[in-house]
Amino acid sequence: MPRPDPEAVAEAVFAALAEPTRRSILSALAARGPTTATDLASQLPITRQAITKHLELLAAAGLVLAEPGERRRIRYRVNAAPMAIAQSYLAALARDWDGKLARLQRSLDAPAPPPAAADPDPAQRTR
C-alpha cells in the first residue's frame, strides 16, 4: 500500500478543520468517544442531516472512521493519523521559519553601532 502524500493529507486536514462545526464535531467525538450522527445531533446545535454531511467530509479527510454499530447504526470515531501527518507538515514549516526568526531576533538584539562622528558645519570649517 503506497504511503499517502503528506502535503495532500495536510491539505485535506486543514480544509476539513477550517469549518468551526467540523471542529466541534471532532471535539465532541474526541471527548465522548465513538458515537452516531443522531447522538451528535442531540449534543450540538445542528440537525442530524447537517452532522452527517460534516461527518462525510471529515471521513473523506480521514479524520473520522465509520464503524458499524448495533442495529445497523453507524458509529463515528476520531482517527488521529491524518492529524499527525498535518502536525509533521506544520513542524517542518516551523523549522524553516525558526532559523529565519532567530537570525532576525539576534539582529534586533545586537547592540546598535555607535553613531558616526558628526562633521562640523562646512561653513564653520572655512573660518
Image (cartoon, rainbow, N blue to C red):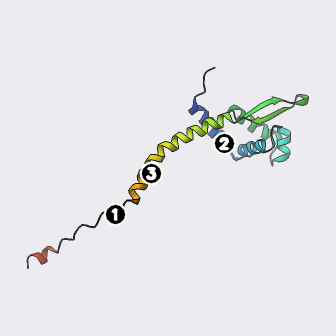
Q: Within the image, what quadrant is residue 13 found in?
A: top right
- Identified at 41% across, 55% down, the residue is 106
Going from the N terminus, do you reach mark 3 or mark 1 first? 3
Q: Position of residue 94 (x, y in %)?
A: 52, 44
Q: Which mark is residue 102?
A: 3
Mark in front: 1 vs 2? 1
- Disc 2 designates what residue? 17
Which type of secondary structure does the marked residue at label 1 adopt?
Answer: loop
Q: Amino acid at mark 2?
A: Leu
**Dot 1 or dot 2, earlier in sequence:** 2
Residue type indicated by callout 1: Ala
| First reached walking from the N terminus: tag 2 or tag 3 | 2
Circle 2: element type: helix
Which residue appears farthest toward the top when viewing the image? 1
- Looking at the rendered structure, which numbered label has been put on residue 112? 1
The image quarter in which residue 112 lies: bottom left
Residue 109: image location, x then y, percent: 41, 60
Query: Label 1 to label 2, Cα distance in Å?
Result: 45 Å
- Residues at discs 3 and 1 in contact (Cβ within 8 Å): no
Looking at the image, residue 40 sits to the left or right of residue 20; the answer is right
